[in-house]
Image (spheres, rainbow, N blue to C red):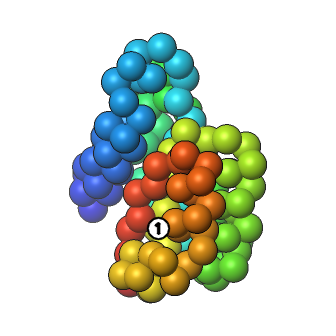
C-alpha cells in the first residue's frame, strides 16, 4: 500500500514538474502543495512521506502538505485560495467534491483561480 501511494505521488510530482518545464526545475526551487481531503488520514500521511522522499531526491523541491481539518469542499477551497496567495508552483489536489474532476468548470477554483494564477494542478477524483 505504501509503495503504491509513493508511486502515485511520484507520478503526480512528475506531472507537476513536467507542467513547470525543465528550465524552471533546473534554476529555481519549486514549491508543490499537496492538498488532501483532510489532515490526519493515514493514507495521505504516507503519500506526504513519499512526496518528501521524492522531493529530497530532486533536491530543489519543497512539499507543502496541507488540507482542511474535515472533509469538506469548502475547507479545501479555503486552503487552495491560501496556496494561490502564497504563489505555489503547482498543486496536487485529492478533491472532496466528486464533481471536481468530472466537471471542473462547475467548481470555480479549479479553472478560474488556478488557471489565472498560472498554477498547474493535478486533480484526483473524490471517491
Report x, y in % for residue 27: 48, 14
Report x, y in % for residue 57: 37, 24
Work out which residue is located at the far top of the displayed protein and give it.
27
User: Is 120 on the left-hand or right-hand side of 38?
Assistant: left
Question: Which residue is denoted by mark 1 in the rendering?
Answer: 94
Q: Residue at x 59, y 53 (%)?
A: 116
Q: Of 84 and 53, which appears nearest the observer?
A: 84
Q: Residue at x 73, y 67 (%)?
A: 78
Q: Secondary structure at mark 1?
A: strand
Residue 40 in sight: no
Relative to 121, residue 104 above or below:
below
Viewport quadrant of the N terminus: bottom left
Q: Of 42 and 33, which appears nearest the observer?
A: 33
Report x, y in % for residue 90: 51, 45
Q: Image quadrant of residue 98?
A: bottom left
Residue 24 in sight: yes
Q: Of 14 and 70, which appears nearest the observer?
A: 14
Amino acid at each position: 500500500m505504501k509503495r503504491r501511494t509513493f508511486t502515485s505521488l511520484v507520478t503526480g510530482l512528475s506531472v507537476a514538474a513536467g507542467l513547470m518545464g525543465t528550465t524552471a526545475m533546473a534554476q529555481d526551487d519549486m514549491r508543490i502543495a499537496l492538498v488532501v481531503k483532510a489532515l490526519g488520514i493515514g493514507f495521505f500521511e504516507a503519500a506526504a512521506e513519499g512526496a518528501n522522499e521524492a522531493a529530497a531526491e530532486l533536491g530543489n523541491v519543497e512539499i507543502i502538505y496541507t488540507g482542511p481539518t474535515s472533509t469538506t469542499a469548502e475547507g479545501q477551497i479555503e486552503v487552495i485560495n491560501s496556496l494561490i496567495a502564497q504563489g505555489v508552483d503547482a498543486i496536487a489536489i485529492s478533491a472532496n467534491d466528486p464533481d471536481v474532476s468530472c466537471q471542473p468548470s462547475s467548481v470555480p477554483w479549479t479553472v478560474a483561480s488556478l488557471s489565472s494564477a498560472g498554477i498547474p494542478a493535478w486533480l484526483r477524483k473524490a471517491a
